[in-house]
């Protein structure tokens, strides 16, 4: 790789890590960057998981040190997420995910509209609608599989699920989301590594940026709280919708 390419991938990793730590959706930046670098699609996805793990790990560490992660609350969900993310990633190596490409933008758009019309959503903790066990089984299996199989919008779905089903306020919901995102990223990475779909040289260039971006993004989210996260959250969701719809209809 040229130094110019390395520098661009570093800054793509940094930007993706920052966005991912605050609201999810870092793949909007990192996956196109990897495709631009000339990687085949499945290798781009595997390499993306490799670099994303490190940024998410940094964000989790930051949220945990600030006291926003309850490990007893999240551990069962982590277990379900890991198992089903492995299954989802294995499945995507066997079949096409074209149907999801058509459905997911409209699901994300619905979430964006819902959040925009609910200004108090996640501002304070609310009553949980599911027990931790039921939430772990439902969200861990569905969203774990989805992240392994396709991925775009996973952080958005997790955050909304944590707010609406567990009653978490937005900062704690974001912290919970980072833990389970780390889990599904790591599970998917294991499958991609086993199937030899990771470019380690390119991943290394992005990991350095991810470590910095993940730390900065989590720090900003913790410092400024729910209002800051809400703005970034809605912006990222709308950007994801625009990109996914463009991929469908713009070519």
Image: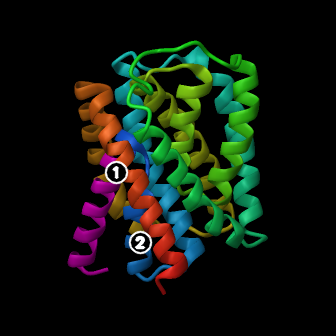
Residue range highlighted in magenta: 1-19
Residue 35 vs 210, above or below: the answer is: below
Based on the picture, tell me whether residue 100 belongs to the magenta stretch.
no
Picture quadrant of residue 1: bottom left
Q: Residue 5: horizontal and vertical position, in percent?
A: 27, 76
Q: Is residue 243 left or right of residue 195?
A: left
Q: Is residue 245 left or right of residue 137?
A: left
Q: Is residue 5 above or below residue 122?
A: below
Residue at 33 percent across and 19 percent down: it is: 66
* Residue at 30 percent of width and 63 percent of height: 12
Packing grade of label 2 (10 A; few <14, some 14-19, many >=20) is some
Residue 2 lies in the magenta-colored region:
yes
Instruction: Name the quadrant containing residue 233.
Output: top left
One can see residue 179 in this view: yes
Please give the label number shown on residue 235. 1
Q: Which of the two labelled residues, at mark 2 and mark 1, occupies the earlier sequence position?
A: 2
- Would residue 26 be visible to someone looking at this image? no
In terms of secondary structure, where does tag 2 sit? helix
Q: Pointer 2: what residue?
A: 32
């Amino acid at each position: 790789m040229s130094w110019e390419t390395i520098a661009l991938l570093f800054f793509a990793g940094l930007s993706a890590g920052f966005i991912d730590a605050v609201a999810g959706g870092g793949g909007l930046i990192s996956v196109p960057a990897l495709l631009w670098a000339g990687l085949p699609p499945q290798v781009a996805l595997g390499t993306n998981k490799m670099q994303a793990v490190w940024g998410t790990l940094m964000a989790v560490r930051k949220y945990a040190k600030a006291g926003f992660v309850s490990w007893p609350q999240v551990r069962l969900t982590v277990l379900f997420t890991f198992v089903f993310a492995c299954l989802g990633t294995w499945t995507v190596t066997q079949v096409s995910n074209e149907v999801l490409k058509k459905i997911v933008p409209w699901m994300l758009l619905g979430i964006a509209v819902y959040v925009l019309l609910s200004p108090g959503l996640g501002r304070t903790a609310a009553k949980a609608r599911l027990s931790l066990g039921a939430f772990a089984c439902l969200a861990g299996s569905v969203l774990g599989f989805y992240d392994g199989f396709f991925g775009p919008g996973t952080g958005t779905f997790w955050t909304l699920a944590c707010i609406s089903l567990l009653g978490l306020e937005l900062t704690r919901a974001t912290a919970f989301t980072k833990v389970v995102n780390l889990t599904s990223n790591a599970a998917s990475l294991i499958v991609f590594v086993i199937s030899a779909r990771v470019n380690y040289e390119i991943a290394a260039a992005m990991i350095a940026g991810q470590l910095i971006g993940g730390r900065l993004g989590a720090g900003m989210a913790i410092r400024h709280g729910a209002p800051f996260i809400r703005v970034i959250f809605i912006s990222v969701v709308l950007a994801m919708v625009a990109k996914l719809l463009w991929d469908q209809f713009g070519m």
